Image: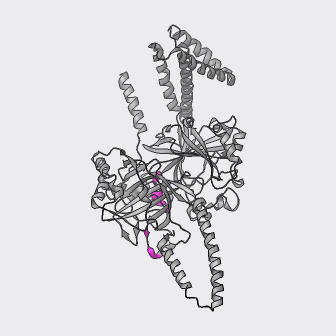
Amino acid sequence: MAARFAFFVVASALLLELGTAPVFSYSGNTGPDKWGSLSPLYATCSNGKAQSPIDIVKNKVVRNKNLKPLRREYYPANATLVNHGYNVGLVFGNAGVLILNGKNYTLLQMHWHSPSEHKIHGVTFDVELHLVHMASDGSLAVIAILYKIGDADPIIAKIQSKLAELAKEVFTNQDQIAVGTYDTWKLRRNTRKYYRYVGSLTTPPCTENVIWHIFGKERSISKEQIEALKAPVKATCKKNSRPVQPLNGRQVELFDEKNIRKKEKRLGENQNYLQLPAMAARFAFFVIASVLLLLHCFAISTDLELEEHGTGPVFSYSGKTGPDNWGSLSPCYTTCSNGKVQSPIDIVKNKVVRNKNLKPLRREYYPVNATLVNHGYNVELKFGNAGVLILNGKNYILRQMHWHSPSEHKINGVTFDAELHLVHNASDGSFTVIAILYKIGDADPIIAKIQGKLAELGEEVFTDEDQIAVGTYDTWKLRRNTRKYYRYVGSLTTPPCTENVTWHIFGKERSISKEQIKALKAPVKATCKENSRPVQPLNGRQVELFDDKCFEFFNMFLFFFFSLFLLHKKVSMFNHKISVGWAATWSSTLEKNKQLNPLKYDFESIVFSHTLRKIISSYNLCTIEFLELLVVNSLTRFLRLFCDFVAKLWRIFWNNFV
């Protein structure tokens, strides 16, 4: 009976942990027309105003003379071939960067759609490759490469045998095969012509504010390679292209290096036909040549400076570049003013809905090299990969964490002294943020680890992005305090204010010292010292609550009886040194409780400890101190939670039946 009960408990826990996201496909009741109704997280798929893909009509495209060839620095990286069921993707840890306006977008993954999703002048291509990039602030950029049937593509040829292996597998949740080192160098070609516009991801959750670059030159692909890409996916996803979406007034820009060169050549030829008297011609030639030389040198230096140190549109937290004006600073920032699911928000407790299907957040963080970065508007601790947050069976990698002061989110109208954001992203471009609120008190050990580096960063003169290597940073302590959190779907709180971000705001605050708040504010610009965006309207969104008092109650119940089981069996797995050390820890905890609340300590220590001492003193164990304290602590917490539970039941009974 005990074995069956244990199996039932373990199996139930595994089912809870291995939940799956809402299923979507490309036909029927889960097809593109229905995506928005499959989940609240997918609502943007139906009501978004800047969706992808689109049909690029050439005579409506605007040439942008300020655009430049895309600057990409790719390099060989370990890759994994993943079958998502709806497409096949090649996932990298970090395969290099795409540099846009001075910001690094890391290449995270690439995947294929057949037939193509984007059209050019109504023409559909045979296949489309998407290279998905993400910056440390969560903003997304995708490069699309179109294919026509012809010779085999050497990029696909490298993984074709692995695709065949993947097709033989029975699809479960996410089949994957290690590819080894994959060189993305050849993907750097064909950037002399491209179309650019602001759109969305083309699969749920259809996140908007994605910067798209569709290359003008196609690649070739063989029919066999198309079949190889289709073979592993589900039957309802063999044709995995979303229909084109309306532009809704968006502008598509064109960069064409050949056209620019032709214009320059024609300009040079026209200058040869200038008819001037001999002396005047020589003088004019001298003056024009001098001016052109000066302008040319200036242009070269300016272009190089923009290429190396280009910055995006400047925003701040006050004045003309403050939050009220973010939407007008750049076409990429329009969601900041017209978005309907923006963050932060004020969480009103009596309007929050308890969701019994939510679970404690499952996070697997580990030590990793970190870099402290000053963006001017905040200070950020950037990681390559510091572990994962697992939601609905999907891994969200912890990429960076940063602070805002005062807090951005409010609870019942109350603003906190600071707020920490842990930004995670998945390989499909979706991302989620954990928010931890702070109140002034003792110093936070998480910040204490980098406080010396913050002081160094504060002494630097801010240029574009000051940064200091921190070395190995252990994110293990960030795993605590997940027993209560609020969840809702919102956006990034800084431009481009990208929506469809899943937020988790922890209910338990951390403490931070005044000196630490000053240290976090010191490096940033004067207009960003108070870097919190005002709260945004809910617009009908629902805020959910997870509060695992019942889970803790059940946990303490099992923990208590497990402790008694150890005593009964006289388990000797704990040696004397360990038991004494653990006993000392529990003793110090009880002593601290005594100082905070003598009555509660007397109740716990005298009644329970005295009774249990008599019961367990007969067992002559070397671990007696540790196990006694273990039982005392677990039993008292169990009874306290049980009393709370009974009191709540009594209140419900009294309010409804008496």
Query: For the point 53% across and 77% down, which residue is it?
Result: 264
Badge count: 0
Would you say residue 395 sits in the magenta stretch?
A: no
Q: How are the colours assigned in the image?
A: one colour
Query: For the point 46% across and 47% down, which residue is it?
Result: 93
Look at the image and tell me whether residue 351 can be seen: no
Q: Is residue 573 left or right of residue 1?
A: right
Q: Quadrant of the N terminus?
A: top left
Residue 274 percent coordinates (x, y): 58, 88
Q: Is residue 624 left or right of residue 373?
A: left
| In the foreground, 196 or 600 | 196
Q: Residue 495 appears in which quarter of the rendering?
A: bottom right
On screen, 414 above or below 441?
below
Q: Is residue 566 left or right of residue 420?
A: left
Q: Quadrant of the C terminus?
A: top right
On screen, 432 above or below 63?
above
Residue found farthest to the bottom: 277
Query: For the point 65% across and 89% down, which residue is it?
Result: 280
Residue 426 percent coordinates (x, y): 47, 48
Bounds of the magenta segment? 40-59
Residue 535 percent coordinates (x, y): 63, 52
Residue 620 percent coordinates (x, y): 50, 8
Q: Residue 242 appears in which quarter of the rendering?
A: bottom left
Look at the image and tell me whether residue 305 can be seen: yes
Query: For the point 33% across and 44% down, which residue is it?
Result: 172
